[in-house]
Image (cartoon, rainbow, N blue to C red):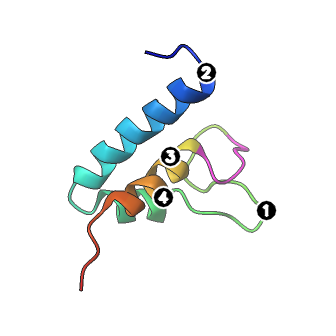
Amino acid sequence: MSNDPDHVRATCITVAAEFVAAQPDGTRRTLRQHRRLDDGNCAGCLTRPTPWPCTAAVIAHTARRLEPRST
């Protein structure tokens, strides 16, 4: 197991993305709330200003890549 902060961060993002991808409509719901405002900040984060993409948006975008493609 690596103690490298970048590895730990990437692992946490991946685990969170897997969770979001497994939720019914989780990716779409997260991205609908955590969207970019005209000023470049996140619409969904309660701590303002939070630059977009926020952590939740990064997780949701990662989750989108994990979801099976519909044909």
Mark 1–mark 4 Cα distance, whole angstroms, equals 20 Å
Label 1 neighbour load within 10 Å: few <14, some 14-19, many 20+: few
Give the structural element (helix, strand or loop) at label 4: helix
Examine the residues drawn in magenta and state their main secondary structure: loop
Quarter of the image with the C terminus in it: bottom left
Q: Which residue is mark 2?
A: 5
Q: How packed is label 4: few (under 14 Cα within 10 Å), some, or many (20 or more)?
A: some
- The span shown in magenta is 48-54
Badge nearest the viewer, 3 or 4? 4
Q: Which quadrant, please, contains the N terminus? A: top left
Kindly report the distance in space between the C-alpha atoms of the residues bearing marks 2 and 1.
Answer: 30 Å
**Label 1: element kind:** loop
- Which marked residue is nearer to the observer: mark 2 or mark 3? 2
Q: Residue at x 31, y 45 (%)?
A: 18
**Residue 4 falls left or right of residue 2:** right
Q: Secondary structure at mark 3?
A: helix
Residue 19 vs 67, above or below: the answer is: above
